[in-house]
Image: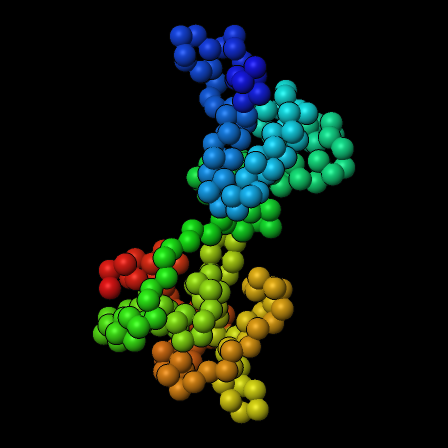
Amino acid sequence: RLSVFNGVDPRGTVAGLASPMGATFGEWLAKYLDKKETNWAPSNRARERRDHERTFGQIPQFTALPIKRIDPAAKSDALDKLGSSARRKATSWIEAIIEFSESGVAIQRNGMEEVEHHASMPYAQVPAFYANLGKLKTDDAHALQWLILTGARSDEVVGAKHKVPATWGEIVLVDGLPVWAIDGSRMKARKVHRVPLTPQMVALLGPRRADGASLFKAANGRGMLSTLKAN
């Protein structure tokens, strides 16, 4: 029964070997839930897992499909078998699980990557750390200094897979003073966020560039994380 739920055809399993067609959607669903579980609050884990299993338990033929063979027609056919509430949830879950099978990245319902949390630095160590970053004079280091001074999220500074980075077009003057105006489409709250800039912040930016140019040429948040770990 467990094999059937996970989308494994018992007839295609011999001496513990799975079907040669590749892992099924149901098998990737199980891996996805194991990954997601670490990001759910302990009080929500059982409920979230039950919700996923109950929803996909209604479409066993779909979960038995090799995930690499799932096409739009298969998705549409499966979703048509669900009620409106389950269909809404399954629509985003299916895309998230397929994405997870390809990249290993678990996606939240709003389409963003799951956040990997890291221990915070003791505040007393921040001034010395900031000073060490200044000695590196790299884009990753400057981006990290900017993040520290502005209190912004890393993806608001250097972008992410589903998010564009900060650009020079967001650096504007308000009453003659420099401000970083982050468009609402890039903010978690979906509202424009304005950060008044100090001379120290402005100095990190260097000469003005084209509005579409990124504020920093840092590769991504992982680049800043590597700088953080190395210093």
Nearest the camera: 135 or 53? 53
How many marks overall? 0
Q: Does any portion of residue 213 appear in the rendered image?
A: no
**Which quadrant holds residue 127?**
bottom left
Quadrant (top left, top right, bottom left, bottom right) of the C terminus: bottom left
Q: Does any portion of residue 128 appear in the rendered image?
A: yes
Query: Would residue 56 appear left or right of 214 to someone viewing this image?
Result: right
Instruction: Determine the residue positioned at 54% across, 51% down.
Output: 112
Q: Quick check: 77 above or below 175? A: above
Nearest the camera: 179 or 150? 150
Measuring from the top left, give residue 204's x and y in whole percent: 36, 78
Measuring from the top left, give residue 80's x and y in whole percent: 74, 30
Instruction: Determine the residue positioned at 46% across, 52% down.
Output: 115
Q: Which residue in the rendered view is the most extreme toward the front?
A: 43
Instruction: Look at the image and name its color scheme.
Output: rainbow
Q: Which residue in the rendered view is the most extreme toward the right?
A: 84
Instruction: Determine the residue positioned at 63% across, 68% down.
Output: 191
Q: Which residue in the rendered view is the most extreme toward the bottom?
A: 176
Measuring from the top left, give residue 177's x and y in whole percent: 51, 89
Q: Quick check: 134 above or below 226? A: below
Instruction: Determine the residue positioned at 45% across, 71% down.
Output: 151
**Which quadrant holds residue 206?**
bottom left
Q: Quick check: 95 above or below 61? A: below
Quadrant (top left, top right, bottom left, bottom right) of the N terminus: top right
Q: Quick check: 208 above or below 65? A: below
Query: Would residue 228 appear left or right of 211 to someone viewing this image?
Result: left
Query: Would residue 107 appear left or right of 124 to someone viewing this image?
Result: right
Measuring from the top left, give residue 128's x and y in whole percent: 26, 74
**Which quadrant holds residue 43?**
top right
